[in-house]
Image (spheres, rainbow, N blue to C red):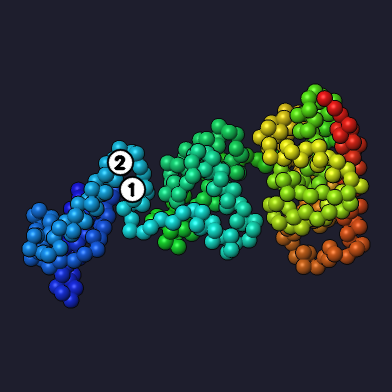
Amino acid sequence: MIGVYLQTSVNKNKEHSLYVRVRAKGINISIPLKFAVQKKHFNTKRKRVRSSHPLSIPFNKRIDEVSAKIYESLQLYRADIITLEEFNSRLSKRTEKSIPHLMSIYKNEKKPNTYSIYQYSITAYERALNKSIIFSDISHSSITKAISKWKTEGLSPTSMNTYIRHLGILKNDAYKRDYCSTPFTRQNAYNQRVERLEIKSITSEQFKEAMSRVKSENERKALILYLLSLMTRGMYFTDFQNMQPQRDVFTHFRHKTKNEMQIDGLDGLITALYDTIKDEVYQLPKYAKIIKRLLGVPFKTARKTYDSYALLNNVDFQIRIHLLGQRDQSIKRHYTNFEMNAIKQKIRDSNTLILDSFNAKEYAKELICLNY
């Protein structure tokens, strides 16, 4: 039911503010019309401003416009074309600001890593829905649609839970900033069951066996990408896109954490590998599939393989964390001076020990010489 009513209270001119009320199943909203009239100028039966009022024409036009908007939204809601949240958003007096607007604020307010993970969640959600999103798209119907899409793509439950959690945080913050009309309501159905954590890595022997099965240039480059990740201590495709390797030690800021890393160029071996695949580092889907087929594990396991070999060689835990470019959350981060030359040499020696135990340098030279 849609109706036009006078507010009970009056202003100093003895005028009553007008509002439109809509009542339906699950809906009870009052929308102010932003004008007021005296009771004698309002026809309660016809719900119109009487012609005796000098502004009756524009006031009645305003009533018609708002009523038409409500009616249209109500019909769409009843037909299950829009959700209740979208219905409320359409009629809200708030002006919804864009997600890019909020992210532009986050660029100054948040740490680079926090900004990146929120942006990554937005991108993953937009890809699942196949459209650019606004805050009202972070709704029950859209989230369940995205979850279905992610499941068909084989996305891990942990990743799905992370994306939804980040989207919820974004929307609730937007609501607090008055950027959208409704907060995020989390449903139990969004939670994806996480199976027992299984850490995957490979052995040197598995990599050697995969090399023996290489039959194309793309397969060769796929293994080079994996080996380059391992030899640069677990770098990802996004790191390769910004990496500028040198013959000796070079500085790289890890894409995910922005942590500074001093990478050993291994007398030009890293540069030689990089030059072989530098034009391929934007083709993650293509090479990710080849790596999974050849090695039986995803590309990102190169990082886990590096750490596993560090453990096998009894590398100190603090040095392992430092080698991987991770943030040490323990109290020790306040005490260990990684700028000491002796510690720097210990880190470099540990890296050499890990790569030698995997036989990485020999594999790299063999892959560079392969031709198809």
Query: Residue lying furthest bottom in this view?
Result: 12
Q: Tell me if 7 is positioned left or right of 340 in this view.
A: left
Task: Residue 141: name its quadrant.
Answer: top left
The answer for how far apart the CA atoms under marks 2 and 1 are is: 8 Å
Q: Residue at x 92, y 47 (%)?
A: 267
**SS for callout 1:** helix
Q: Percent x, y for residue 183?
A: 43, 55
Q: Percent x, y for residue 253?
A: 74, 55
Task: Residue 58: name its quadrant.
Answer: bottom left
Q: Residue at x 66, y 35 (%)?
A: 285
Residue nearest the viewer, comparing 148 with 268: 268
Above-or-below relation of 205 to 304: above
Q: Percent x, y for residue 275?
A: 81, 40
Residue 199: give its label: none
Q: Name the residue under label 2.
A: 76
In the image, what residue type sits under mark 1? Phe
Q: Tell me if 111 is positioned left or right of 70 in this view.
A: right
Residue nearest the viewer, comparing 307 with 20: 20
Q: Residues within 10 Å of mark 2 (few under 14, many from 20)?
A: some
Q: Which residue is drawn at 27% across and 55% down?
A: 29
Above-or-below relation of 182 to 299: below
The answer to whether any part of residue 314 appears in the image is no
**SS for callout 2:** helix
Q: Name the residue under label 1.
A: 87
**Quadrant that contains the C terminus:** top right
Above-or-below relation of 67 to 357: below
